[in-house]
Amino acid sequence: MSFELTTKYLEEINERLESGALDTVVDELQELHAADVAEILDELKLDNVKAILAKFDEEQRADILVELDEDSRAKVLKEASGKDIAETLVDNLDSDDAADIIGELSDEQKKEVFTHIEDREQAKEIASLLTHAEDTAGALMATELIQVNENWTVLSSVKEMRKQAEDVDQVHAVYVVDDEGVLKGSLSLKKLLTTSTKTPIREIYNTKIQSVKTNTPEEDVAILMSKYDLFVIPVTDEMGKLLGRITLDDVVDVIKEEADRDYQLASGITEDVEAADKLLPLTRARLPWLVIGLFGGLIAAIVISTNEGKIAIIPKLAFFMPLIAAMGGNVGVQSSAIIVQALANKSFSGTILNKLTKELLIGLINGLICSVLLLGASTLLGYSLKLALTVSVALFCIIIFASLFGTFIPLALNRFKIDPAVATGPFITTLNDILGLSIYFYISKLIFAF
Amino acid sequence: MSFELTTKYLEEINERLESGALDTVVDELQELHAADVAEILDELKLDNVKAILAKFDEEQRADILVELDEDSRAKVLKEASGKDIAETLVDNLDSDDAADIIGELSDEQKKEVFTHIEDREQAKEIASLLTHAEDTAGALMATELIQVNENWTVLSSVKEMRKQAEDVDQVHAVYVVDDEGVLKGSLSLKKLLTTSTKTPIREIYNTKIQSVKTNTPEEDVAILMSKYDLFVIPVTDEMGKLLGRITLDDVVDVIKEEADRDYQLASGITEDVEAADKLLPLTRARLPWLVIGLFGGLIAAIVISTNEGKIAIIPKLAFFMPLIAAMGGNVGVQSSAIIVQALANKSFSGTILNKLTKELLIGLINGLICSVLLLGASTLLGYSLKLALTVSVALFCIIIFASLFGTFIPLALNRFKIDPAVATGPFITTLNDILGLSIYFYISKLIFAF
């Protein structure tokens, strides 16, 4: 039932457009969901995109514009008049989507759009949505909602709701406010329909209601909504005045973006990029960690050079350097990943000491198993007992050390309000490389009595 | 407005429970959301959990049970009678939640629960939910839904809907089916309320509707619902018969679990674990990759030992081995992460050759920058030009090679239906360590003319 864009279908569309069959292509696209049309348009030439969009009616065009990639949308809207943009977007989209798109325009275009929004109340609402900081509840919310006054009766509320519902596509919840517009609670439709029409609202509404403030970080909104299984949450200002609502579909995007970002940070990619992005951002996103890794490697080279004498006496010591460095990195990443995740999901309970103790125990078990394996393997490979012992004992120490380190660093970063996700990946790896080598040479000194 | 569990509050609760103040603690917990109560109970002793749960009414108890950790829930329900479980769960929960909990019980308990479900129709529904494979739409869906027949009139539909709505907590959508129960479309409440009561449903329902089959993988359900911004999606059997529906809140859990799993795989953790898990699963989840890393390190040692002669002549060659090994790993992980993400989000477009070309270009740019930096740094550190050249040229080659490798491996795994997420993390790192060292020694041979 679901549409999947294939390279073949795209080629076919392009061929048909080139042979002038615009109308039949548009007829076909009319049958698809706006999100699917946008997926196709993202891959077409600008002229074709504009020609196709012109064939859709205003409402469909607005829906497709919302779904386009930011880059494609910027190109399409670049030469559009403020009047066109205002007419297409404002009446056909929820305020949050309209504000998102208007927010992407140049200052000049923005101004022009605002002068062409006929309903001045609507213009004000959209302008105020644009003032909220990125990544906050205010930037996610839409202002369309159904609200009734706690002092009204059921009858007058139903009348008023009918009027408000005209501007609202989908009714997610009915909110109750006081005379100042302060959010007091919510009203279930069931209750409204089964209560006598003369009953005052204040007697039947539900006062236990979760809400967020405009400056609540979007991650916190996501955690709240998914914890309490909410489909919609109201947003208020600092005084509790009801300003808008956030629906779960918008929060799903937040959750996915955040997961993608954490995964990329753990993989040493510092900017938010996608496989489809251009060469330069993709390159730039990766360079910082490579340079850090490079300098880490140079420090490792210095550590080794100070131990050149030991390698000169026992050259075989050098054979195990990559193993030692790699294992420290692996263990450190594993330990930090668990902590980073617990912190991100706010499922972190217990004290730091607790965590460190647990990691210490895991390190002891895994360290012991790996060391025994390494002792056996290196003996089998014909290395001397002294060398095999050095490598195994060093590995044991490094696994324990890296476990503790991998636990402690993200916790410490978090305490200083730095995103702990930067701790995993190359940072921990590089640090553990250097530390691992230092420990290795120190233990070789003890065992070989240099 | 949101509840956050602190260690201090937990201690206070424990103290109060020990001093016999059970009732005041329960009074306080009554004010909280079931999800918050569950969060607290997860941390208390079993006896206290049982005592507290006994004070809640049946409906609240059911809501709290759903929210408990699987471990805590297993302990609480271990000695509960089948009758108690049936009475608490079946009437107070949606079928999907009831089925999830019953599915966790022992076979014996399961049987006992089913004999005590009074409504045999309900028992059958829950039993059939248990037959669906894990991680499919069937295992996610609930059977509570509102459906009307396309041959009914608006009037008879509204009457029938009232009856059905009694069993349904929240009305997400009204589905239209034919006489065989096959899903034909959906009905908007607005339309229903604004159309003459004698109109047949077949004239007013919306036929463009997304649905999934019971065996659709849950990841595909998540992608579909988030792409089309759906709050609810109907589930049918192979013949198109309407069986249930999945709501977005359940899909949010799927998205989060999957993101967590991918992040863990990338960090070298093979089982689904949390920071709060016990020692043994945490240890076991990490060991496989450590052992792989260990044997990778041993192979690296063998690669180095075959080049012992070169190190004997130029011992300083050994200094840069960890740098070379680490950089190959870093670049490989970066490249594979982007591909793994594109595959997971099904946002992968274009051919493999395209991707490889792009990665080749990124590798060329980053490789060039890093090599020049390394050439400068190692010259500054006083190494000979020949050594500095060897290291820089090797780094350049390795960055390009690792870029291509990191792109190709996840694509190849995906083609063979293996989860490409296993490709990132330790696997790519280990492989690139070994390859990097081989390239390094080969280039040293060319430059020093051994």
Image (spheres, coloured by chain):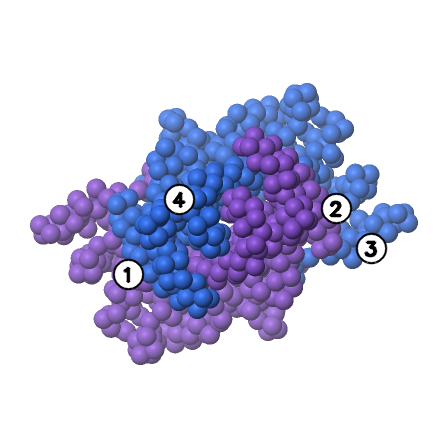
Chain colours: A blue, B purple
Res. B72 mark: 1
Res. A12 mark: 3
Find disc 2 in the rendering and name its residue. Answer: A43
Discs 2, 1: same chain: no
Please tell me which of labels 3 and 4 falls first in the chain.
3
Please tell me which of labels 2 and 3 falls first in the chain.
3
Please tell me which of labels 2 and 4 falls first in the chain.
2
Q: Disc 3 and disc 4: Cα gap in Å?
A: 61 Å
Q: Disc 2 and disc 4: Cα gap in Å?
A: 52 Å
**Quadrant of the rendered image containing residue A54:** top right
- Judging from the image, mark 2 belongs to the subunit labelled A
Dot in front, 3 or 4: 4
Asked if residue A318 lies left or right of residue B389, the reply is left
Q: Amino acid at mark 4?
A: Ser
Q: Disc 1 and disc 3: Cα gap in Å?
A: 56 Å
Q: Tell whether label 4 touches label 2 (CB within 8 Å).
A: no
The kind of secondary structure element at disc 3 is helix
The kind of secondary structure element at disc 1 is helix
Q: Disc 2 and disc 3: Cα gap in Å?
A: 13 Å
Res. A438 mark: 4
Q: Assess disc 2: are there few (<14), some (14-19) or many (≥20) residues with their C-alpha within 10 Å of its C-alpha.
A: some
The kind of secondary structure element at disc 4 is helix
Q: Disc 4 and disc 1: Cα gap in Å?
A: 44 Å
**Quadrant of the rendered image containing residue A47:** top right
- Judging from the image, mark 1 belongs to the subunit labelled B
